[in-house]
Amino acid sequence: MESLLSVRDLVKTYGKGANEVHALCGVSMDIRAGEVLVLMGPSGSGKTTLISILGGILTATSGSVRIEGREVVGLPEKELPALRRELFGFIFQGFNLFPALTAQENVAIMCRLKGVNSANLRAAELLESVGLGAKLKSYPADLSGGQKQRVAIARALAGEPRIILADEPTAALDSVSGRTVLEILSGLAREKNRAVVIVTHDPRVLEYCDRIVHIEDGRVGAEESRRKVEAMV
Amino acid sequence: MNILAWKNLLHDRVRLVVTLTGIVFALVLIAVQFGMFLGFLDTSANVVEHNTADLWISAPGIPHVNGGSPIAESKRWKALQVPGVEKAVNFTLFFLNWKLPNGAFETCQIAGFDLDSGMGAPWNVVEGRIEDLRAEDTVFVDELYKKKLGVSRIGDTLELNGKRARVAGFTHGIRSFTTAPYVFTSFKNAQTYMRLRESETIFILIRTRPGADLAAVKTRLLAAVPGVDVFTRAEMLQRTQNYWVFGTGAGTTTLMGAILGLLVGIVVVAQTIYAATIDHLKEFGTLKAMGATNGQIYRVIILQAVLAAVMGYALGISIALFVVNSTAETDLLIKLPWQVAVGIFGMTLLMCMSASLLSIRKATTIDPAMVFRG
């Protein structure tokens, strides 16, 4: 598989002088289209910092992040929103849905943000694709955790992003809902050839992933292939 | 994005009610206080404003139109000889006692005018004819003061400064700034009521010839008629308004009330819009993380403020109009001309938008990475 996202010697340092904290210390990795990559590691190991830099939300101190060959480290601040809009879909542990909007409006607002024509129609199609065709007019408060996360997935898919970045997508879900969400995410990688990066502590994710990268103290530790993962599962 | 602004605003009903209450409270306070100020300007000098005289001759140093003192009526003949003067007539305005049917007294202001020229005549006559004032002891009063003066219809007879006064007609809406209503009568009758000598008047009103230079006529009058002051209509109007509206503190108080309303409005609206932004900070962070620009987020916040302003204005101006209409038949005049209503709309928009600036500042500093912090 081709490398969609290439990370080299990535460093992120917070603070200065005596207060300096090294969140990432020379991380290198490749993320390929069509694979589900899981980032695992203890709290404070740098996973969230890494996913934030990959998604153009945080800027790196040094190093290189190339997306489809294009260097994004060092891009001016004002170019980052467009980068996030065009390339990424985000899924959050807390769903981050807009409580005042219906499921369809939550997805449609992102379609409009990403310049998708017929936003309402496309939002309905996306919700249909995650099995929520009957919940278009429901508000987040009326949905279960699993349904909320599926709305969040539909929203992340607005604008057909090449890379899905998911932060603890199953942490707040029961086992059935968690599996449904993971099946949808792995389906996106396998059937739609998207790169899916999941930050998680949830062992249920392992059976759906292709690779696990362990992050420890801001460095890439062990990396396990799909075969090894299958053996573990 | 517009839908987010609209639905965010409607989603939290309690906050919406608080925001609208703040806007409505401020707006009603501003509209009513400013309307009262305009009403004060109007009522304090309406007898000057509706008087068609070009120049007023009075005793020297009078503070306002209601504070005149007698001058020799013979000065009128001197005034008539001044080039540029077409007409010079007598006019009185003076506080007198009006005896009510129950024997109590009310103070009124007697306006005695020249029936032939019509300078100083009442306006908005709704019952009776001005010509009826040629009869002895006849007066016109305003409908708004019927109860206060103890009259109800034409022909009612009371006592004015110890002399008989018969109601010959009614006007509508000639309010007095003081508690003393205006009572109109002929100059001759007024002389009798005021117990003025035949040779005395309070004012001499001048009508200039068409095309005459007002300032030049005034200068010539001052030179030709000794021991008097001469005022143009605008000068007398301003002198009177300044005395009653600003000299008494009434105008300053109402203007302060309007400014206070504006300040209260800004504080309440700023606080609620700021709190609403803080509540939605995570949503704005999510939008930023997903690629929304700062400009798009500002638009949501400003649109929320504009929508709140429009809703608040619709409610507030309706209440203000209700207050204005409910005082239409009282002696308190609150004016709300359309220009003021439009101005208040602009100010409401400005108030809400400036209140949202604080929130925008907060939104600028959102770290999109907050979305990953659970």
Image (cartoon, rainbow, N blue to C red):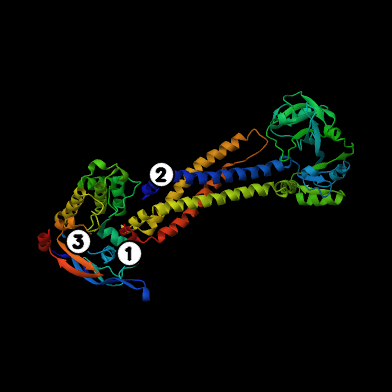
Query: The disc numbered 1 marks a residue on which chain?
Result: A
Quick check: can you spot residue B1?
yes
Looking at the rendered structure, which numbered label has been put on residue B204?
A: none
Query: The disc numbered 2 marks a residue on which chain?
Result: B
Q: Are the numbered discs 3 and 1 placed on the same chain, yes or no?
A: yes
Q: Nearer the viewer, mark 3 or mark 1?
A: 3
Horizontal and vertical percent position of residue B10: 41, 44
Local packing at callout 3 (Cα closer than 10 Å; few below 14, some 14-19, many 20+) is many
Marks 1/2: CA distance? 33 Å
Q: In the rendered image, which residue does mark 2 sit on?
A: B10
Residue A28 vs residue B355, the one in the foreground: A28
Q: In the rendered image, which residue does mark 1 sit on?
A: A79
| Amino acid on which the number 2 mark rests in the picture | Leu
Q: Secondary structure at mark 1?
A: helix
Q: Is residue B204 left or right of residue B7?
A: right
- Answer with the quarter of the image where residue A198 lies: bottom left
